[in-house]
Image (cartoon, helix red, strand yellow):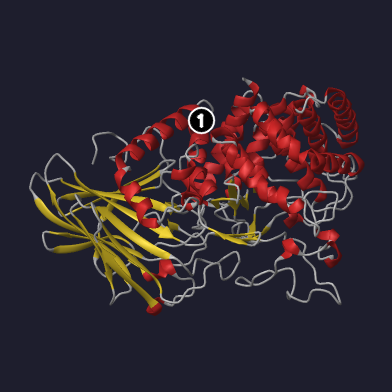
Amino acid sequence: MEQNSRKEGIRRIALGRLPAVPLITCDPYFSLWSGSDCLTGTDAMHWTGRRKRVAGTARIDGREYRFMGLGEAEAMEQTALSVTALHSVYRFQDAGVELAVDFWTPLLLEDLDILSRPCSYVDMAVRSMDGKSHMVEVVLEFDGELCCDKGQTGKIGGGCYAPADSRIAWMGLREQSPLGYSGDSVTIDWGYLYLAAAEAEPLEVVYAQDAHSLRAKAQLQAKPGSWEKVSLVAAYDDIASIQYFGRMLPGYWARNGKNIHDMISEALEEHDSLLRRCEAFETAMERDAMEFGPSYTKICIAAYRQSIAAHKLIADEDGNPVFISKECHSNGCAATVDVTYPSAPLFFLYNPELVRGMMRPVFRFAKLPIWNFDFAPHDAGRYPHVTGQVYGYRQKPGSIQYLEGEAEPDGHRYPMLWQMPTCADIYDLRYQMPIEECGNMLILEAALARLDSERAKEELQQQLPLFETWAEYLLQNGANPGQQLCTDDYAGHIDHNINLAMKAVMGVEAYAILLETAQRTDQADLFHEKAREMARDVYTRALGTDHTKFTFDAEEESWSLKYNAVWDLAFGTKLWDEDFYQQEIALYHRKRNAYGVPLYSIESYTKSDWMIWAASLDGTGRTVEEFSGDILRFLEESPDRVPFTDWYMTEEARQCPLCSFQNRTVQGAMFMPLLLKRMTTR
């Protein structure tokens, strides 16, 4: 492999043990993970846990060994695993040969064309460890399971061909219904998987019709002292990526008519340059995160690929980027506002345009007749259909009789909600999140304005009427919230929720920032003062013995993580004084368990996103590293082999049994300390 430490699987900062290791991470469907400490311990899986087999074998001097997946061949000894932000590098040894396998995806947030490519790289290299030369045949075989949701691999077809400068093999179901269903714990049932190699590579790729699989085979000579390497591109063309308000749209990379063969050709040609760019990004990210400490750096590494690949990037009719999240292992909602809110720090840091891309479908839906509320929506559909909010959907007698209930089974499609008239009246007010989502949208837009006020002015011309409506809702209802759901809806309806009231305060202040950006100075001053008055009132009623309570009417010793207050620090608005922050941080340290601080006093579970935001309330930065150590300990010890869950138990290293959150983009919240530092030192 290349003569640098990362390519040999050794870095200054790298994760070792994770509950699940990212292998291919492009989008919610093209997502491949290992749920084992050793790559040979289990078959590869989708983030849902469904098996998606990739078999890896190395025939060394005629004897076959296994380095990936289950099987009958003897397993090679895995000697190392190094996980960085963009790479998962495995090292194996046997029969005098060392094998390195590097799975990497160039998720470079500043380059939307590269980011949106549904392709990932597998680099393999061998060298001799015993001073002798060895012939090594390395084989990777991707099973037809990657192309279908229900295991119908017998219905798969494929082929191979050799265009100029490359070799390509492909496969997919012979009968397909693109975007044929929606849901949460489902995998793709349409499109085509490709394996490709440059012509110069000593690599053969074929469609194995008898096995319904794609097979890549390389003949390599392991020599002493130097690596002989080969690189493979794995790509997935979903043809149609998102149903977007009545239009079936492809990925952003294909917005101007580019096809999968063009993209694969570019990916092969740019392998080396992308490798260098990824290396530069990782080095810079690690350097910045290390200012808080090694534990914090490692949880940022663990969060990075997952947080991005739980989205799909498309372009709307005007060519604007639209970044659609999938609410993984929660309910499958698409473009969920209270998922965007915690995930946003990552994208604010590296490309704020992606935050705008997350908000665009929400703005669009909020202006439609069917949404006749004076507060912001919760979502804009159920992935991959962005056709209107599905959360809190109800059947109305004599009206729409379409769904069996709110918890609709995976696979079912919702009707085209976006084009329905107001009189359809399909949403149950009790199951909305009015204060939560109004606050979220206003805060996100204000952060965009603080990061780039000139760019924000353009958008404000279109959205200010919505923002005014939402800010007025918060003024009227936010200081003492009634029985409402918040983003932590698994706790049910909470009456007089102080954390929600603090979000309302920040939402009103955010609107003042937007008015200031729009140069409406008099109105801005008025709302700044309203936010200050609201903040004083909330704090006075929230104060218990020496900290703020859970709810206004709760006992004095109750408490909760006041994570929404972090925006007071980010905006520099000083709505709460230093005593508040010191009291809260001291409380959180007293309440720590083995794996972190519970979310509130009534349960022992936590949310990793909110725990890091709460840690950020400590201006010294020390709490960030300490709480990051708790999260890292959970990752290292959890027996639940799933991608980085954000909801887990703090007294034992277990995923929360109430709902198995995993692979969620909310882990972009881990980057809040870095964002806070940038916003307060600009």
> Is the residue 572 above or below the residue 160 in the image?
above
Q: Which residue is mark 1?
A: 289
| Residue 226 shown left or right of residue 76 in the figure | left
In-front residue for pair 201/278: 201
**Residue 484 or residue 117, whichever sits in front:** 117
Query: Which residue is outermost to the left?
Result: 132
Rendered position, 243 above or below 601: below
Q: Is residue 42 something one can see in this rendering? A: no
Residue at 33% of width from left, 37% of height from top? 273
Quarter of the image where one finds residue 656: bottom right
Q: Horizontal and vertical percent for residue 306?
A: 51, 49
Q: Residue at x 56, y 71 (%)?
A: 180
Q: Secondary structure at mark 1?
A: helix
Q: Would you say 371 lies left or right of 232 here?
A: right
Between 437 and 541, which is closer to the camera in this rendering?
A: 437
Foreground of the two, 511 or 300? 511
Q: Residues within 10 Å of mark 1 (few under 14, many from 20)?
A: many
Q: Position of residue 96 (x, y in %)?
A: 14, 51
Residue 25 in sight here: yes
Q: Is residue 435 left or right of residue 256?
A: right
Q: Is residue 242 above or below residue 621?
A: below
Q: Residue at x 33, y 71 (%)?
A: 158
Farthest residue to the top: give it.
681
Q: Is residue 680 above or below residue 478?
A: above
Query: Can you say which quadrant of the picture contains the C terminus?
Result: top right
- Residue flagged by tag 1: what amino acid is it? Ala
Q: Quadrant of the N terminus?
A: top left
Task: Give the percent coordinates (x, y) of residue 23.
Answer: 40, 53
Residue 245: percent from the left, percent from the top? Answer: 66, 59
